[in-house]
Amino acid sequence: MPIVLDSYNETASQQCLAEKSNTLNSLGFNLRELIEDNSLKTDLQGFLEIISKEKLPSPRVPDSWKSFRKQYKNGFYIISVPIVNDKCDSVIFYYSYYCNERCGNGGMVLYKKAGAKWKLIKEYCKWVS
């Protein structure tokens, strides 16, 4: 499944962070740092296929979804850089999944570490198309 890494500069993720700031602050996330830090990096290579935005289907290009599906059978995800709290037991990120030009979903998700696994705790600003 192809993934495009994005930053928290995206308007939807910044707006969602601002709306949920009290909840996230109580979990140990420093929201000012999250919004202002553009240098966050992650290494997902080996787990997912990370592609550039230029490879994504475009509504301006005829049959771009058809071409995309020849190489990548399903849709794709766009995710923000995951951000972990100070205790390293919670992570939050914004995601969008697109199955075609009129199909998708997304939102901001909060996971908490439970033993060796991560458990979905809450979804914020969820959308479905």
Image: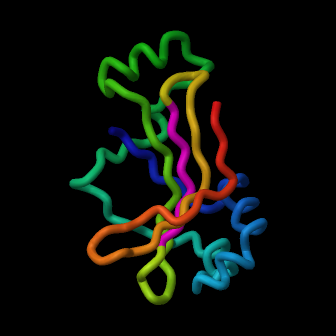
Residue 25 is drawn in which quadrant? bottom right
Q: Name the dominant secondary structure of the magenta segment.
A: strand
Residue at 75 percent of width and 60 percent of height: 15
Pick the front one: 55 or 85 = 85
124 in relation to 97, above or below? below
Q: How many marks?
A: 0
Taking 90 as reference, is 60 left or right? right
Quarter of the image that includes the C terminus? top right
- Return the residue found at the far left: 46
Q: Give coordinates of residue 1: x percent, y percent.
A: 33, 38
Q: Give coordinates of residue 35: x percent, y percent.
A: 66, 72
- Range of residues picked out in magenta: 91-98
Taking 72 as reference, is 9 left or right? right
Residue at 39 percent of width and 16 percent of height: 67
Residue at 42 percent of width and 83 percent of height: 88
Residue at 30 percent of width and 77 percent of height: 115
Q: Give coordinates of residue 8: x percent, y percent.
A: 61, 62
Residue 113 is drawn in which quadrant? bottom left
127 in relation to 57, above or below? below
Q: Give coordinates of residue 36: x percent, y percent.
A: 66, 75
Residue 24 is a magenta residue: no
Q: How is the image coloured?
A: rainbow
Taking 18 as reference, is 6 left or right? left
- Return the residue found at the far top: 62
Residue 96 is a magenta residue: yes
Taking 61 as reference, is 32 left or right? right
